[in-house]
Image (cartoon, grey):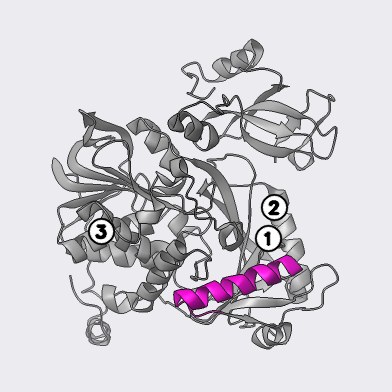
Amino acid sequence: MLTIHCPNCGITAEETEFHAGGEAHLKRFGPGSSDAEFESYLFMRDNPKGVHFERWRHNNGCGKWFHVARDTTTLEVFGSYSAQTTEPPQDILDVITDRHPDWTQGRNA
Amino acid sequence: MKKYSVFAVAREAMRHHTGWTRAWRDAAPKKKYDVIIIGAGGHGLATAYYLGKNFGITNVAILEKGWLGGGNTGRNTTIIRSNYLQDPSAAIYEKSRSLYETMSQDLNYNVMFSPRGVIMLAQTEHEVRGYKRTAHANNLQGVSTEFIGPEKVKQLVPIINIDGPRYPVLGGLWQARGGTARHDAVAWGYARACSDMGMDVIQKCEVTGIRQSGGKVTGVSTNKGDIDCDKLGMVVAGHSGHLADMAGFRLPIESVSLQALVSEPIKPCMDVVVMANTVHGYMSQSDKGEMVIGGGTDGYNNYTQRGSFHHIEETVRALIETFPMVSRLKMLRQWGGIVDVTGDRSPILSKTPVEGVFVNCGWGTGGFKAIPGSGWAMAELMAKGRSPLTDAFGLNRFVEGRFIDESVAAGVAH
């Protein structure tokens, strides 16, 4: 059972209040992009064993989207941050590197 | 390899069972193999077995980071069926189901295949329409299924409550030749047959890197040293994305946890498999008498082989409504397995951007039923470069938008 903090309304609750929305920070490719870029955007995922940046929605709360950094091998939640960004903020990265000094960011992030 | 038979049992009974030998050799890796298969679960072992049996390729190693059949092969709820909607799915799943029929004889190993019949309950009008459509499609594909009414469901499953207040049973998709098999025995039987053909099953051998030269695979690095190969098959379910990352490409897959649980053993009360997709629960009774129950997947990426408790709670709540008698059962064990889910809920059997590397993954929540068919098709793909069973399941279907949508047949329950 994950405990997640919603940065939009400030509530910390267990995961049944939220809904997972898949990998965060995907770069959008639309008309004019190559087939490979479009395929990558739509389907290809890092699916990392370890640190994962992902989208969550506060379904049974304020209803807004936000981002969470989480470890897929320990289920540790590193922190939440606003969805209005294209990359994880420094304070979240600091928490992660503090826990995993040799961690490097994946391709999509 | 000594053949198992009634005479062997009688002979060993006469000498206090001192003559039984190991079913397969615990091998150490050689320097080079023609083919390396990563993953000694059902799919990997079946691939190796049919490479040897159908194509005479026996210089094969099967590498396993844990123990034989210790991943999803030993964690599933052992359901076998082939009532899928799309033609490519029906072809590979029905091939698989038909191979299960004779697997015990083919492998000389009792996998306890029990074609007891599988019902997928229709509990909403949408499901009624969906399953009627599937039954019609199955008839065209030569897969024997039928849509049955609630009275027939009640007759097949006397313990079921067909007029529950929330989810009444409106009918069901019935496949009489579906059923269950003993999952460990499937892995053990294939391992024994592979070992007998001279293949090496190497346990506790974790792949740490995939070596390539000029865009072609040359071997793997492992915790037991480097091993060379001409062709490499990745058959590792939940860890497919992790291995693909080592090889330098990505897959359209996300790994999530799928949970199951078993009850204390009780007297025989249900002799078919019942699946209820609307309420995310499915149940069968094992030969030991335990009720084997499967639930839903978590929504988030996970590699921990355990899942969220609220999914268990939802599954059990739904099952109690459908089978009131299970409310007094104690549960013995609960566990999770990491399943590799694709966007269209269909598997990937394909060549990859690295020459000589093949993937067999994406079976998601329902891989056990597909083990022999998947191995059969994957072996042909690896030996000949293509197989009629795998043509539709290539990675290129995501570029071309040629999906094999099985979200009705495989969305949750297996």
For the stretch drawn in magenta, what is the main secondary structure? helix
Point 74% across, 74% down: residue: B323
- Subunit bearing disc 1: B
The reply to whether label 1 and label 2 mark residues of one chain is: yes
Q: Nearer the viewer, residue B364 or B130?
A: B130
For label 3, the crowd category at 10 Å Cα-Cα, with few meaning under 14, some 14 to 19 and many 20 or more, is many
Magenta span of residues: B124-145
Distance, label 1 to label 2, CA atoms, is 9 Å
Name the mark on residue B280. 1
- Which sits earlier in the primary sequence, circle 1 or circle 2? 1
- Subunit bearing disc 3: B
Q: Is residue B132 above or below residue A2?
A: below
Q: Is residue A105 left or right of residue B373?
A: right
Asked whether residue B287 is in view, the answer is no
On whether residue B217 falls in the magenta region, the answer is no
Name the mark on residue B311. 2
Distance, label 3 to label 1, CA atoms, is 35 Å
Per the image, the residue denoted by label 3 is B380
- Which sits earlier in the primary sequence, circle 3 or circle 1? 1
